[in-house]
Structures are given as structure tokens and as C-alpha cells.
Amino acid sequence: ESRGRLATALLALLNSASETELRDVLAGIGAVRARLIVETRSERLFESLDDAFGRIGLSAKQASNLTLANLRQILASRPTTSPRKRDGARARRSYRKSGRVLARKEGDDPKREYPATIVKVHDCGTVYDIKYDDGTTWKNAPAEVVRL
């Protein structure tokens, strides 16, 4: 299970972090590789770690070394998950301030998502203020428009 959590967290990071965040969180990622990751995912998001590593040109050994060297940072970059509800169903995932996410834009194509950062968390994680990488913002965005 922890291997799956790590893979999910790393994939989310690769799909949403800015160049600066990639360099800050992942030791061994320089400016050129970070730029390549951002440019490559702008064409289409990475579907899996194999897809990501293949498209950015990392060998299996390089990918493994990168992952192992950055376990703590990768897992720390994950959003929190709310505790279970009383009926046992899993509660909605909530995100932390400064968390990196993909989010739809207000009034835009509902199938299109954009890299963004959570600026403020309202109402116990059911409403957010979002700042998109292009500089636009959405205040009081419902949780349904945000995903990891």
C-alpha cells in the first residue's frame, strides 16, 4: 500500500508542480529537467509513472534513484485525506494551503483542468481559493472542481 501511495503522490507532483516546486521537492531535478517535465505534461498529463519517466527520458535506474532519494519530500507534498465518516464511507479528500492540484476553471470547459495552488481553505476543506499557474484566481471554488 505504501508503494501505491508513493506512486500516486509522485505522479500527482509530476502532473501539477511548477518548475520551482519540482526543483525544491525533488533532489537531483535541475532547471532543464524541471522545464522538460512542465512542457511535456502541458501536451497531456502523465497517465502513470512509466509514462512520465519514458516521456521525460529517465531510465528505470534514474527513476528509481530519484524516487528513493526523495521519499520524504514526495509523501509530504500529498494532500491530507479526511477521516472516515461515521457510516464508514470515505470522506471527501481535502487539500492543504499551498497544495498543488489540478482544477477546472470557473465558466470553462468542465473537462479541462489546469495546474494550480490552493491559496486558502474554507469550510473544513469543502471550498477553496485557487491560484492557477497562469495567474488567474477563483475564490470560493467548490471542492468538486479540485483534484490531485
Image (tube, grey):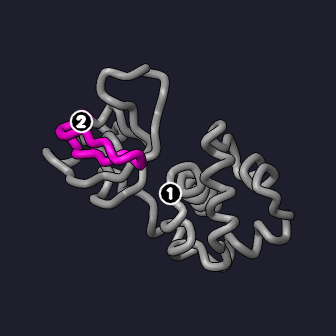
Expressed as whole percent of the image width and height from the top left, the position of residue 137 reads 27, 42
Q: What residue is drawn where x is 63% and y is 70%? A: 31
Q: Between marks 1 and 2, how big is the CA–CA gap?
A: 20 Å
Q: Is residue 91 above or below residue 98?
A: above
Expressed as whole percent of the image width and height from the top left, the position of residue 148 reads 46, 46
Expressed as whole percent of the image width and height from the top left, the position of residue 116 reads 39, 48
Q: In the rendered view of the protein, which quadrant contains the N terminus? A: bottom right
Expressed as whole percent of the image width and height from the top left, the position of residue 79 reads 39, 56
Q: Is residue 130 magenta?
A: yes
Q: What residue is drawn where x is 65% and y is 37%? A: 44
Instruction: Please say whether residue 148 is visible from this viewpoint.
Output: no
Instruction: Please say whether residue 79 is visible from this viewpoint.
Output: yes
Q: What stretch of residues is rendered in magenta? A: 127-142
Q: Is residue 113 above or below residue 101?
A: above
Residue 60 found in image quarter: bottom right
Q: Main secondary structure of the magenta part?
A: strand
Amino acid tagged 2: Ala
Residue 141: image tag: 2
Task: From the viewer's perspective, tell me whether residue 29 is left or right of residue 23.
Answer: right
Dot placed on the residue nearer the N-terminal end, 1 or 2: 1
Q: What residue is drawn where x is 30% and y is 27%? A: 106
Task: From the viewer's perspective, tell me whether residue 46 is left or right of residue 53.
Answer: left
Amino acid tagged 1: Ala
Question: Along the line of sight, which residue is nearer the eye, 142 or 83?
Answer: 142
Q: Is residue 121 above or below residue 112?
A: below
Q: What residue is drawn where x is 85% and y is 70%? A: 61
Q: Is residue 68 magenta?
A: no
State the SS at label 1. Answer: loop
Q: Residue furthest left?
A: 123
The residue that mark 1 highlights is: 17
